[in-house]
Amino acid sequence: MSPLMSILIPAYGMHGNGAQMLNRALGSIFDQELNKTLRSGGVEVVVSDHSSTGVLRKTCRESRPPSGFSLKYYVNNDGTNSASSNLNFAFSRSGGSLVKILFQDDFLVSRRALTEVFEAFLIDDDKHWLVSGSTHTRDGLDYFGDIVPEYHDEIHLGRNTISSPSVLAVRRSAWQNFDPKLRWLLDVEVYKALHASYGPPIVLSAVHVANGLGDHQVTAQGIPPARLLLEKVRVGSRHGPGGYAVAQIEIKALARKYARKWTKKALSATKHVLSQPH
């Protein structure tokens, strides 16, 4: 029998931090207080592993899911270094009627998070996707920057007012594959696609997820402007206002940004010259 809910964890080595992060995420899941229906129907956790060391396999083997939970581990050699590919693979190995994402370096901070997600879908049975509140942490102890998700029509172009994919849950029939060619806009593009297909999400303001911040993150290395521009053109071509229009807007914005930067430098240099004794 298929489980009521699947939790997808796209995993990788994470520069040596993978096992620690995965263990934290799994612990937060297995510590959940499930209501009677959800516990009876079952929650499966699907880990899709892009690493090659076997460390994450060992972590999963040593995990002891409590009653109501199961854990499935898969090696995924396809689309290495693509979170989108890893997520899509994990979904293909899942069977839950509801599907929730939890990135490896994120974790659940509310012990009733899964129950509240499940019950929200029961109440709003005409809704197909859900986003919940989130916060941020660097050490797993101190939290900051709480976010209540909010959708807007240009979210696919990069101003993310919802947060990471870890706040997202969908009905299985509404799943949208993540685009493997997107690295920075993979989540906001899916939010746009879900809204276009199914309308507004259920929004739970309660903080369910902590987004783990650190040097292991893709965004911690900085976002190359040219790569980000290409991604915006890609999603703009798919969801509007068109690739050419997006390119024009972004190039003008970059021009203004660098013009301000060089103007500031020129003024600073001029002040320095004028301040020198003659």
Image (spheres, grey):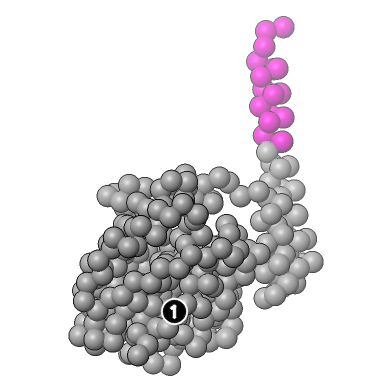
Would you place residue 235 above or below residue 211 in this image? below
Residue for point 73% across, 42% down: 259
Q: Nearer the viewer, residue 179 or 126?
A: 179
**Residue 273 is covered by the magenta coloring:** yes
Position of 266 with respect to 110 (left or right) is right
Give the SS element for disc 1.
loop
Q: Is residue 81 above or below residue 172?
A: above
- Quadrant of the rendered image containing residue 81: bottom right
Q: Looking at the image, how many numbered discs can be counted on the residues?
A: 1
The magenta span reads 262-278
Q: Quadrant of the N terminus?
A: bottom left
Position in image of residue 52 (x %, y %): 50, 54
In this rendering, position of residue 207 left or right of residue 15: left
Disc 1 marks which amino acid?
Answer: Ser
Residue 159 x, y percent position in the rendering: 56, 62
Which corner quadrant of the image does residue 233 belong to? bottom right
Q: Is residue 78 magenta?
A: no
